[in-house]
Amino acid sequence: MRIAVFGATGVVGSALLPRLTPEHEVVAVSRSVRADESHVRWVEGDACSADDVARAVDGAQIVYYLVHSLGSRDFARQDRVAAENVAGACERAGVEQIVYLGGLGDDAAAASPHLESRRETGERLAAGATPVTTLRAAMIVGRGSAAFETIVALVDRLPAMLTPSWVSTPTQPIALDDTARYLAGVCGNQLTLGQSFDTGGPEVMTYRQMIERIATLRGRRPLILEVPVLTPRLSSLWLHLVTPVGASVARPLIEGLKNPTIVREERLRTLVPFELTTFDEAATMAFAQ
């Protein structure tokens, strides 16, 4: 099959491409010019451009939508426009399936603007005639993942941390490779069309426990003190000072940490069965890259 991947240069897209290329013809969409590779044809384009999107999906049977505009001042609007472009172009081109990676917790009543944008993106994609398969994930554990890299940087740079109350929020992080396996596994699967699936790793933990687990793997023992008065704005500015993630990216992420991100159903584990990677294994692999 011919598959178009939007967000192909991102963390998840880069992990997904090698899982698609052995069996499919892949068109990878990038905002910059890239040389074609074996089984991958690169197309320069921006999801916010209707013309670029139409050119990228022409002839495709499956389209992966792994795009987000986090870090932009108007990320919600940009994501909305991009999703509408892709939904419209897929409908006109006769695409058989859109696969979208959204976020766990995006349906909470008090979801953060970032998670609300993820939910709205899924709705805009599904507004067209093309069936959408949505996978919803919490933190992705892998090199380049903004949330994961933020926590690693905190552990590496701070011997003591004054942390806000969100460190007690439960979450279910998933390994980058497992995310790519799930995404590849739903490709063309008729049982997944028009369906939304929760995806997560084998362990539920709080962010504090995650920090402590990473610290152990890094050979560190930071002092962690929880304080209830650190606002999302102050949290993001604090992260901007001590991590590689800018405040424009950190703040939307931090605002979303108040929402529990736990898998509530496990249908996908039956449809795409494999042994999930533990958190420690996923983190160790990320450190080695």
Image: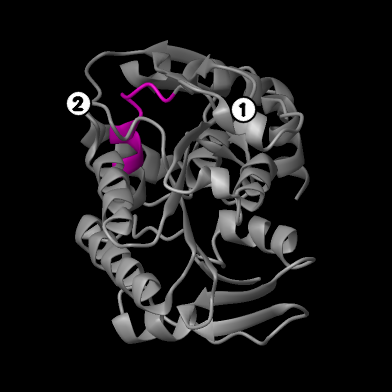
User: Which residue bears the numbered disc 2?
Assistant: 109
Type of residue at label 2? Ala
Q: Secondary structure at mark 2?
A: loop
Q: How is the image coloured?
A: one colour
The residue closer to the viewer here, 137 or 130, is 130
When the figure is inspected, residue 41 is found, relative to residue 172, above or below; the finding is below
Q: Amino acid at mark 1?
A: Gly
- Image coords of residue 173 (percent x, y): 55, 29
Label 1 to label 2, Cα distance in Å? 24 Å
- The percent position of residue 85, horizontal first and vertical second, equals 30, 72
Residue 31 in view of the camera:
no
User: Residue 168 is drawn in which quadrant?
Assistant: top left
Residue to which mark 1 is pinned = 201
Which residue occupies the foreground of this view, 72 or 278? 278
Image quadrant in which you'd find residue 269: top right
Q: Position of residue 218 (x, y in %)?
A: 71, 29
Residue 164 located within the stretch drawn in magenta = no
Image-based side of 127 in relation to 167, left or right: left
> What span is colored magenta in the figure?
252-261
Left/right placement of residue 117 relative to residue 198 reads left
Q: Which residue is found at the position 42% from the left and 53% from the top?
A: 132
- Near mark 1 (Cα within 10 A), the count class, few <14, some 14-19 or many ≥20, is many
Q: Quarter of the image holding residue 28?
A: bottom right
Residue drawn at x 26%, y 27% as measured from the top left: 108
Location of the N terminus by quadrant is: bottom right
First in residue order: circle 1 vs circle 2: 2
Look at the numbered disc 1 and give the secondary structure of its residue.
loop
Looking at this view, is 132 or 226 the one in front? 132
Instruction: State the image coordinates of residue 143 (x, y, percent, origin top left).
Output: 63, 48
Q: How many marks?
A: 2
